[in-house]
Image: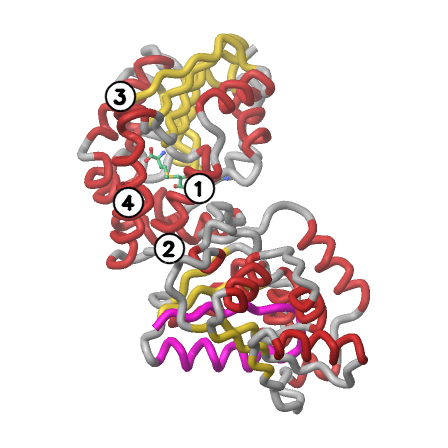
């Protein structure tokens, strides 16, 4: 059975939680989308902390049902639930706000939840709306009647305050709500599925997959990753160079730079990835730090490398500027990153990235990382755009070459 669950910004989050658990208990496949205000309500009503980051709210909400639940961004129209041709057994909006009722009744559509509900109505599939708000104005009632006539089941959730005690006493103050809203309006929605995660979540994710990271790399690239790292290092590192390997992870690129004769510093913000790196080399200086605020002086390095890490930065432009800052004028950078190939290999790459990698994630620890990986590749700038961004960050002589049949881009550039 396959069910879409939309969560909107109305009181009644505990019903959504119970429904999710009940569906998961009968092994139902669940597509979940929550609006921004829906997430705010989940954070407030279920976890008593409206300041929780959205991705953490959704992680907690999904909880042990992670195997059955796929979370979609509010505007992810590529989700199967946006299409009438995907097989879906039922659609539920719980809680369902009166704003949602109004939008649906007018035939308008502003997000995936509206789109899924509208698909349900036009395809004459089961659509259950769970409002809770009372009293209702004649506008609300007319909206509910319209949707009922169009085929929706209106199932009012019983009243009764199930919010945590602390919140009942101290419902969100207005400044808190304003701050929360402002935060929600700034920046993109973060989720594994959108390929955009907050730095804390990225760090936790890499901490979790550290034990299998190297093995997964070898398997996913058929061992080619070693060759790509070697090529990157050869382009920018000369014996005696002081080299920074940013986002060094388990250290393979840094080790390659040391083999080439560099005096190397490896930097990463995941303690677990660094632990693995430390186990591989005692001569490289391993630093726990943030690539967006490098703990180094201007012009300190002759060369810098980043292997498959730049895609994870919350602020790509800032990351590039930081690399430029710590390089001496003329110092060179090499950036290796996965990219989407054009031409013949494209269908194979898509099969690998969109089907096989997420499948691997279903059986491996930290599996969500393998949902994030393809999504982050999809949203990351292509090689031409990354070249442009390097130029804008002050680099000169920007070049790139494609490796692995066009699935990996190696950019090189010189700091000015
Ligand atoms: C895909 S791994 C790449 C590891 C390694 N460079 C390689 O070639 O295999 C990405 C790494 O970037 C790190 N990372 C992501 N954002 C970071 C940031 N803002 N500061 C430092 N490290 C970061 C992660 O912790 C992770 O270890």
Residue 208 shown left or right of residue 132 in the figure: left
Foreground of the two, 172 or 386: 386
Provide residue 182's location: percent of width, then percent of height: 73, 53
Residue at point 53%, 55% (across, down): 73
The crowding category of the residue bearing disc 1, from other C-alpha atoms within 10 Å (few below 14, some 14 to 19, many at least 20), is: many
Provide residue 117's location: percent of width, then percent of height: 55, 66
Residue at point 41%, 82% (across, down): 22
Kindly check if marks 4 and 3 are in contact, taking CB atoms under 8 A apart as contact.
no
Of marks 2 and 4, which one's residue comes earlier in the chain?
Answer: 4
Q: Secondary structure at mark 4?
A: helix
Foreground of the two, 330 or 41: 41
Q: Is residue 17 magenta?
A: yes
- Cα gap from disc 4 to disc 3, whole angstroms: 18 Å
Q: Is residue 85 above or below residue 283?
A: below
Quadrant assignment for the C terminus? top right
Q: Residue under circle 2?
A: 368
Q: Is residue 398 magenta?
A: no
Residue 179 shown left or right of residue 32 in the figure: right
Of marks 1 and 2, which one's residue comes earlier in the chain?
Answer: 2
The crowding category of the residue bearing disc 4, from other C-alpha atoms within 10 Å (few below 14, some 14 to 19, many at least 20), is: some
Q: Is mark 4 within 8 Å of ligand 1?
A: yes
Whether residue 46 is visible: no
Residue at point 43%, 53% (across, down): 204
**Start-end of magenta stretch:** 1-25
Of marks 1 and 4, which one's residue comes earlier in the chain?
Answer: 4
The crowding category of the residue bearing disc 3, from other C-alpha atoms within 10 Å (few below 14, some 14 to 19, many at least 20), is: some
Q: Residue under circle 3?
A: 230
Provide residue 129's location: percent of width, then percent of height: 58, 77
Q: Residue under circle 1?
A: 376
Of marks 2 and 3, which one's residue comes earlier in the chain?
Answer: 3
């Amino acid at each position: 059975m396959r069910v879409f669950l939309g969560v909107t910004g109305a009181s009644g989050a505990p019903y959504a939680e119970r429904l999710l658990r009940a569906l998961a208990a009968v092994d139902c496949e669940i597509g979940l989308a929550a609006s921004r205000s829906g997430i705010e309500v989940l954070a407030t009503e279920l976890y008593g902390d409206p300041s929780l980051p959205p991705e953490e709210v959704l992680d907690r909400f999904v909880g042990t049902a992670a195997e059955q639940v796929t979370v979609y961004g509010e505007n992810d129209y590529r989700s199967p639930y946006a299409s009438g041709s995907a097989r879906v057994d039922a659609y539920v909006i719980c809680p369902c706000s009166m704003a949602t009722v109004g939008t649906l009744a007018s035939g308008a559509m502003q997000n995936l939840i509206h789109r899924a509900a509208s698909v349900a109505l036009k395809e004459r599939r089961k659509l259950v709306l769970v409002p809770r708000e009372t009293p209702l104005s004649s506008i609300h009632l007319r909206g509910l009647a319209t949707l009922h006539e169009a085929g929706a089941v209106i199932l009012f959730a019983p009243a009764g305050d199930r919010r945590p005690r602390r919140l009942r006493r101290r419902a969100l103050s207005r400044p808190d709500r304003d701050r929360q809203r402002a935060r929600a309006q700034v920046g993109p929605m973060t989720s594994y599925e959108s390929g955009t995660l907050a730095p804390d979540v990225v760090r936790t994710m890499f901490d979790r997959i550290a034990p299998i990271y190297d093995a997964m790399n070898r398997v996913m690239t058929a061992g080619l990753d070693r060759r790509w790292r070697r090529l990157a290092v050869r382009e920018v590192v000369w014996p005696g160079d002081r080299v920074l390997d940013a986002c060094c992870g388990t250290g393979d690129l840094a080790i390659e730079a040391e083999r080439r004769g560099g005096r190397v510093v490896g930097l990463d913000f995941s303690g677990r990835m660094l632990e693995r790196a430390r186990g591989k080399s005692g001569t490289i200086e391993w630093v726990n730090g943030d690539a967006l605020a490098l703990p180094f002086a201007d012009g300190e390095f002759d060369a810098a490398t980043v292997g498959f890490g730049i895609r994870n930065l919350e602020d790509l432009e800032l990351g590039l500027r930081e690399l430029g800052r710590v390089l001496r004028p003329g110092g060179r950078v090499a950036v290796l990153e996965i990219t989407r190939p054009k031409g013949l290999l494209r269908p194979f790459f898509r099969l690998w990235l969109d089907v096989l990698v997420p499948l691997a994630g279903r059986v491996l620890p930290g599996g969500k990382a393998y949902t994030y990986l393809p999504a982050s590749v999809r949203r990351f700038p292509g090689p031409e755009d990354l070249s442009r961004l390097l130029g804008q960050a002050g680099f000169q002589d920007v070049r790139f070459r494609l490796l692995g049949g066009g699935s990996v881009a190696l950019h090189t550039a010189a700091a000015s």
